Image (spheres, rainbow, N blue to C red):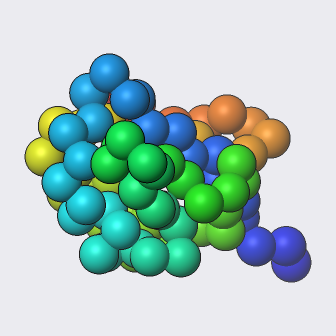
Amino acid sequence: MAQTKWRVTVDTDLCIGSGGCVLRAPEGFELDAARQSCPRHAVLGASDEVLDAAENCPVEAITIVEEGSGAAVFPPAD
């Protein structure tokens, strides 16, 4: 069975560069030259660390959807 893949995006208009996502999921996020978060890859393997980073972003700048289906992972669909 194939591992679930996520498409992770960061809204740079919201990101304040706290770096919490990099500390929680260094394999998934890095800070760019402007000190804004960006995913290390366009598609990431589903992981508790990446989800934790999104859930704990102080400005809710991280969005995660399932690759292929587009189903919302975070924030959850209402």
The quarter of the displayed image where residue 48 is located: bottom left
Give the residue at x 35% y 68%.
22
> Relative to residue 20, is residue 34 drawn left or right?
right
11 displayed left or right of 21 = right
Residue 66 in sight from this viewpoint: no
Pinpoint residue 21: horizontal percent, then vertical percent: 32, 62
Q: Quadrant of residue 74?
A: top left
- Tag count in the figure? 0
Q: Left or right of 27: which side holds 16?
A: left
Residue under the image location 85 percent in, 73 percent down: 2
- Residue 50: image quadrant is bottom left
- Answer above or below: position of 42 versus 5: above
Residue found at x 46% / y 50%: 32
From this viewpoint, is residue 8 visible?
Answer: yes
Q: Position of residue 58 (x, y in %)?
A: 13, 46
Find the residue positioned furthest to the right.
1
Percent x, y for residue 61?
A: 31, 36
Q: Quadrant of the C terminus?
A: top left
Q: Residue furthest top?
A: 13
What is the residue that sits farthest to the front in this orientation?
Answer: 33
Comparing 2 with 15, the one in front is 15
Q: Quadrant of the N terminus?
A: bottom right
- In the rendered image, residue 26, in percent from the top left (x then y), is placed at 44, 76
Q: Is residue 43 above or below residue 34?
A: below
Q: Is 24 on the left or on the right of 25, as rendered?
A: left
